[in-house]
Amino acid sequence: MKIPRLLISSLVLAATLLGCGTLLAQEKTPAAPTVSTGTLWLKAEKGDAKALAELRGRAEKGEAVAQFNLGHMYRTGQGVAKDEVEAVKWFRKAADQGFAKAQNNLGAMYSNGLGVAKDEVEAVKWFRKAADQGNADGQSNLGVMYWFGNGVVKDELEAYKWWLLAGAQGNENAKRNIPLFEKNLTPSQRAEAQKRAREFKKK
């Protein structure tokens, strides 16, 4: 049986384009600067030293979007030398502010042992923080952890619940996992998981 891939969220170009999980991060972000963080990233990843310096400056001042995008650059080696330890550092700074996409990415780094010692319990913690904010990648990843009992007590119903929630948002991994794994659940188990998903949406 193929194990679903744990997703790492791609960069966000600006606070207005974040989709899921803006919440605390957007509230803590300083007033929008003249040049968007996304514009800076596009220049920085092409090797613009001035743009990279400004992006880093914003990250160091606590702008969560800049921290997330800088972490993404270090993880992929776009515009900077690839450095997974540095990527974890910046993802953590944004995650600590409640930035859901960074929380998901930090969870994926822990789950895969990238830039940090592999720790599935810590991975579950960060996936859950992202999932609770409605981040689809975090929900899908948390489902994987529950299904296989990685870093958490195995719970197939809870896994199915998170995949239902992520799939409803269009998450492709979750949408593939639902029909692949639901055959292992009884009709009553599927109904219970669906009930849990509905209850989560009401929160």
Image: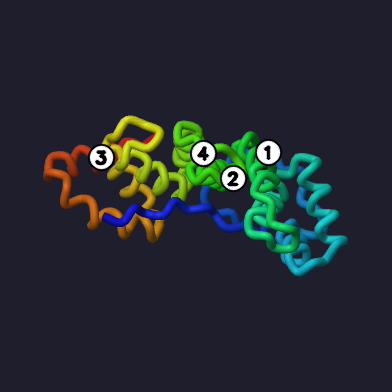
Query: Callout 2: helix, strand or loop?
Result: helix
Q: Is residue 97 left or right of residue 134?
A: right
Query: Callout 1: helix, strand or loop?
Result: helix
Q: Which residue is mark 1?
A: 93
Residue furthest to the right: 50
Q: Are marks 1 and 3 in contact (CB under 8 Å)?
A: no
Query: Callout 3: helix, strand or loop?
Result: helix
Amino acid type, callout 4? Lys
Q: From where the camera sits, is residue 167 visible? A: no
Q: Are marks 2 and 1 in contact (CB under 8 Å)?
A: yes
Q: Tell me what residue is drawn at x 52 percent, y 50 percent.
A: 20
In this view, the residue in front, 142 or 22, is 142
Between marks 4 and 3, how big is the CA–CA gap? Answer: 23 Å
Q: Which residue is mark 2?
A: 102
Q: Are marks 4 and 3 in contact (CB under 8 Å)?
A: no
Indicate the position of residue 113 as horizontal and vertical percent values: 53, 43
Q: Quadrant of the N terminus?
A: bottom left
Q: Quadrant of the C terminus?
A: top left
Q: Is residue 189 left or right of residue 36?
A: left
Q: From where the camera sits, is residue 135 visible? A: yes
Query: Which of marks 3 and 4 precedes in the sequence?
Result: 4
Residue 118 numbered tag: 4
Mark 4 or mark 3, whichever is nearer to me? 4
Amino acid type, callout 3? Glu
Indicate whether 46 appears above or below 85.
below
Mark 4 or mark 1, whichever is nearer to me? 4
Query: Which of marks 1 and 2 precedes in the sequence?
Result: 1
Between marks 1 and 3, how big is the CA–CA gap? Answer: 32 Å
Q: Tell me what residue is drawn at x 77 percent, y 63 percent.
A: 44
Query: Which of marks 2 and 3 precedes in the sequence?
Result: 2
